[in-house]
Amino acid sequence: MRVLILGGTAEARSLAAALVSEGHDVTSSLAGRVSRPRLPVGRVRIGGFGGSAGLARYLAEHRVERLVDATHPFATTMTRHAVEAAAATGVPALRLARPGWSGHPDVGAWHWVDGYAAARVAAERLGSRPLLTTGRQTLDHFRPWADRFVLVRLVEPLEEPAPTSWTILRDRGPFSVEAEVTLMREHAVDVLLTKDSGGAYTSAKLDAARELGVPVVVVRRPALPSGLREVADVAAVADWLR
Ligand SMILES: NC(=O)c1ccc[n+]([C@@H]2O[C@H](COP(=O)([O-])OP(=O)(O)OC[C@H]3O[C@@H](n4cnc5c(N)ncnc54)[C@H](OP(=O)(O)O)[C@@H]3O)[C@@H](O)[C@H]2O)c1
């Protein structure tokens, strides 16, 4: 089967490895945002397609037989384009996404919000020294905090300078609970902001927050476009291909 995986996540890399070992002809696509990406096995292409029409063209030109959208749960534009391109070309598509953190034991204590502006408003009521881990592309929503302390953790450097009152850390994990506790203590963090990315790489901060009694604000996952089936593990994708 000729398969295109829309990737940029750990599960996309696991999927590529599994499908290559089953003998599928696999190409993984990366957006090209990360300067030193962890590369999957199999063929890799890097860069945008040029919208859903560009992706549809790619699917046709490369005679792709199956499309798997394994992008990050918050990469909503790419997921929408995948659905549109699949509909336009008739290529069957499936979504692979890691489960969110809704199974975490502290889930009931967290403050769940829809969107980043709501996260900012919720966090303002809970603390004054936030640790912000929602990602580089969300920072515009936090510009009203330009005159106060914010500890921001990012994978990639910022293209524009951050407010001088912000402390920017660059790290992409995986993180340990111990290291997260130390970090939050060092900066006297009193509220944690995250999105429901799920997975183990970045979940230690949630346990660290519990240990320190720091409240947590979690941005809910965006809804999936209708008609797109989602599975949670690599085995389910392999079954679908069979
Ligand atoms: N959003 C996050 O929090 C997050 C976290 C970790 C990793 N990632 C990964 O980083 C990448 C970009 O995320 P995003 O939130 O910026 O995406 P997005 O907002 O949904 O997509 C914006 C545009 O980036 C291009 N793009 C995104 N993913 C691509 C892929 N796998 N291959 C080729 N082009 C891609 C597409 O450009 P064209 O329209 O030109 O095709 C898309 O329209 C994704 O691959 C995602 O898996 C995202």
Image (tube, rainbow, N blue to C red):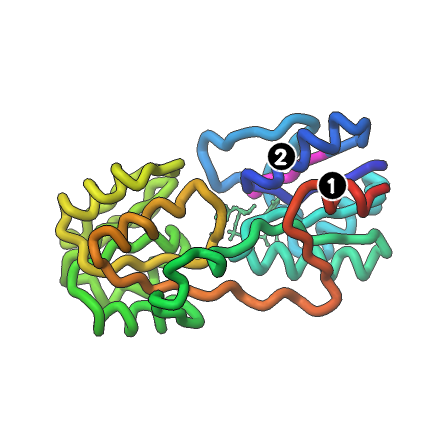
Q: Position of residue 43 (x, y in %)?
A: 69, 28
Q: Position of residue 60 (x, y in %)?
A: 83, 46
Q: Which mark is residue 14?
A: 2
The reply to whether the magenta stretch includes residue 29 is yes
Q: Which residue is mark 1?
A: 4
Instruction: Specify whether 48 is left or right of 37.
Output: right
- What secondary structure is found at the residue carrying circle 2? helix
Q: Residues within 10 Å of mark 1 (few under 14, many from 20)?
A: many
Q: Are marks 1 and 2 in contact (CB under 8 Å)?
A: no
- First of labels 1, 2 by sequence position: 1
Mark 2 CB within 8 Å of ligand 1: no
Q: Position of residue 164 (x, y in %)?
A: 15, 52
Identified at 78% across, 56% down, the residue is 86
The quadrant of the rendering that contains the C terminus is top right
Q: Main secondary structure of the magenta part?
A: strand
| Three-letter code for the amino acid on which mark 1 is drawn | Leu
Identified at 38% across, 37% down, the residue is 173
Identified at 62% across, 40% down, the residue is 12
The quadrant of the rendering that contains the N terminus is top right
Residue 40, by quadrant, is: top right
Q: Which residues are magenta?
A: 27-31
Q: Is residue 183 above or below residue 115?
A: above
